[in-house]
Amino acid sequence: MDFDSPMDTQYVGIKAIGYYLPGGVMTGHDMAELSGIPASVFVEEIGIVQKPVAGADEHPSEMGVRAALDAIGKAGVPPSAIDLIAYCGAGDYDYRFWSPAAKIQDAIGARGAFAFEIRNFCNSGNLGIHICRNMLLTDSAYRHALVVCSDKLSHLLNYANPDCLSTFVMADGAAAVVLEKGEQSNRILAYHGMTDGSLADFLKIPSGGTRAPEGADGAHHLLNVDNPKELNRIFSELYLKNYQLVVRASLEKSGCRLDDVRLLLTNQVKKSLALQILAALSLTEEQTLVTLPELGHLGPADTLLGLAKSLEAGKVNSGDIVVLASSAAGFSWAALTLQWL
């Protein structure tokens, strides 16, 4: 750690973003064959053409290592300079009782880093950045943090159950960011999150916890949507309302307005819902990036990958206000406001 270099410790910025996508692919037509649902539902209604799928021998921690090394390389920061590592996954770890953050710490050679897990499902990436930012700001010994989002969500899906259609877009991949205290460009300005716990039981894997340690039925080990019609009804009343609330609250905390937003990058949802989110916030399709057609839904990595792809496409310019917004099982909503300089 370098305590002597001058820096403005008021700010924490994103130094670099890295990502990794596995080479395997599942198409909308593949999902149609597995589920018995017409391919047009996947391709035209939901808007997914294909998604990346990890191989049987490819696991979340390994994908996370690849994304972490990509981010560290782009940042020009040696692993020995990383003070914090937060692993922010939504799905299964490589093992049930185990620390993927510690595995990544060892694999990348960040010997001096404190490594830990953060779990808020698809909000985990935004929350991880917020928590690490606060830790950097409040501890003089810390300067760099690595936030890693990595998931192998495809193996949790039950294509034989049409009630779970909304989950079939879930895919595999990883993204990571290096945060630096004193990095005044690409500043993290504000965060706001909220939870409605009345929806907690609608989406879960029934078997594997203390209530049902091991189920004889293999389907109990897969993601299940309880009462999808009721969930859709409730969501129609709450989803857009809460999405707007967290975006507006995060902007207000940052001293910005909706008119200032250049890009809103969300977790990847079906086409109709994505358009509703933009319309509710008076934003246009040019003010987002849609990766669902080719990359599916990558859980908490979605917003970080969206930011990385937006930068590669030249969609972010100096001074732009960018909001990363997500929703998650539980159910929670969160938004993180950045200023790209």
Image: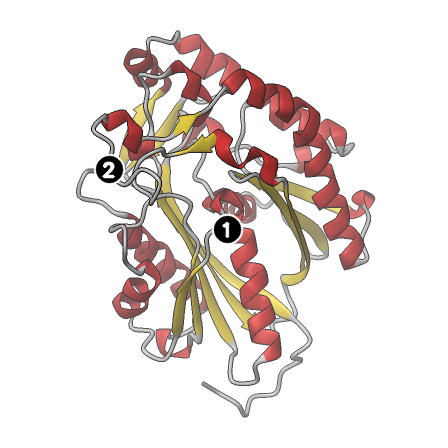
Image mark count: 2
Q: In this orientation, which residue lies closer to the viewer: 284 or 149?
A: 149
For the point 36% across and 80% down, the residue is: 112
- Residue 69, by quadrant, is bottom left
Q: Mark 2 vs mark 1: which is more N-terminal? A: 1
Residue at image position (63%, 36%) is 288
Above or below, 168 relative to 58: above
Name the one closer to the observer, 50 or 123.
123
The image shows residue 67 at horizontal and vertical percentages of 37, 55
Left or right, 255 with respect to 12, comes to right
Q: Is residue 171 visible?
A: yes
Identify which amino acid the numbered label 1 is placed on.
Ser
Q: Secondary structure at mark 2?
A: loop
Can residue 181 be seen from the camera position used here?
A: no
Within-10-Å neighbours for mark 2: few <14, some 14–19, many 20+ = some
Which dot marks residue 124? 1
Contact between marks 2 and 1 (CB within 8 A): the answer is no
Tag 2: amino acid:
Glu
Residue, far left: 57
